[in-house]
Amino acid sequence: MDFKLPKYNAPNWQDEKLIKSQDVKLSPAKADGILPDGFYLTSIYPEYIKLNRKWELVEENIPFTLLVVKDGIIIPTEAENIKEKDLVVCTNITDGSDGLFVNENPFDGLEYNFDLLSYDVSGSEKYDKMMSVLEAERNNENGYIVWVLGPAVVFDYDTRVALTELIEEGYVDCLMAGNAMATHDLEGGYLETALGQNIYTQESMPNGHYNHLDTINEARRLGSVEAFVESGEVEDGLMKKLIENKIPYVLAGSIRDDGPLPPVYADSFEAVMAMEEELKKATLVITLATQLHSVGAASMVPCYRVENGEIRPVYVYSIDISDYSTASVMRVRDNYGVESFLTNVQDFSYIMKQKLIR
């Protein structure tokens, strides 16, 4: 299936409302972390603000943040990072009449097609489309494919192997997960178990519930996951392959993590900032078997990127056995530029490997 990026539907700048509107209102923050009244939170869509009588695109947008203008530059900013006297965009009108325009129909065909829930469209057609997007982004020199993974992906031997091969073949530019996914993947490469069960037979090992703690302990003793992998003690797995190929990863911690592993962000805000830094580059995001990390990542990615001076779409795919999880991702994306697969990670990963790696 050939894949072509849809063209951008630019706003009609001849619209009298856009021509006659005043510059957007900018109000100073009252103190560090204290927002001015009427502040605006960004969306996933392309947004323009009028400055000095000229419409300017928010080029590196981050949804659900504030817009700060500094020396004529528009900077999406988390509320926690707002500083006293920062000039913040303040309006709740998005049709352009008040200096802010949100383009809610930037690309044709990206609205979620609920017909795909019917039997009129085969599952193989959805897979074929996704494979086309993946191939296109892998071959695009500016493509950046981010995977967001839950621990279920490393509890099964075939799933773990399939995802490892996808990393090796260049289909992963960044990986995001929590402490559990990385820990149990390393456990698999170190002790051949995940949560104490043999990763191939799922047989519980004697005292296997200690295995993930022994794995964390060894990584901490050596000082880093990289040192753990380089020691030769980790035979295989996703983390090993990421490190060998110098692919960045972000591990965000949660309440009651064991350890955690050395690179895990225990501070949730630091984790958000690290994720945003990678997601700024994303052209395709695939979330797999993790609700909270999936929703978190999906809420940080706009539906567009500026690439070589052109505005192009960003695609998001949500894969989970739970329809609540996929529906949550779709909801935070406003059902735009997002597709969902209601399936288990084992089947999905195996099909991906069969279709992409020949």
Image (cartoon, rainbow, N blue to C red):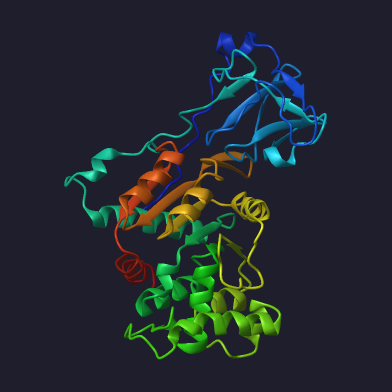
The mark total stands at 0
Q: Residue furthest left?
A: 119
**Does 14 appear above or below 60?**
above
Q: Return the residue nearer the eye: 67 or 179.
A: 179
Residues 354 and 36: in front is 36
Residue 238 appears in the rendering: no
Q: Quadrant of residue 79?
A: top right
Query: In the image, 147: left or right of 277?
Result: left
Q: Does 192 sit left or right of 252 as displayed?
A: left
Q: Quadrant of the N terminus?
A: bottom left
Name the quadrant containing residue 173. Answer: bottom right
Say if residue 119 shows up in the picture: yes
Q: Residue at the location (45% across, 68% down)?
A: 151
The image position of residue 174, as x and y in percent, is 57, 62
Q: Residue at x 63, y 14 (%)?
A: 98
| Residue that appears at 49% across and 69% down | 181
Q: Position of residue 102 (x, y in %)?
A: 55, 26
Position above or below: 23 against 180: above
Q: Is residue 8 above or below residue 17?
A: below
**Residue 116, how many percent across, how many down?**
25, 44
Residue visible at 75% across and 22% down in the picture:
27
| Quarter residue 255 falls in | bottom right
Front-most of residues 110 and 70: 70
Q: From the viewer's perspective, is 311 left or right of 204? A: right
In the rendered image, which quarter contains the C terminus?
A: bottom left
Where in the figure is residue 73, as x and y percent of width and height? Answer: 76, 33
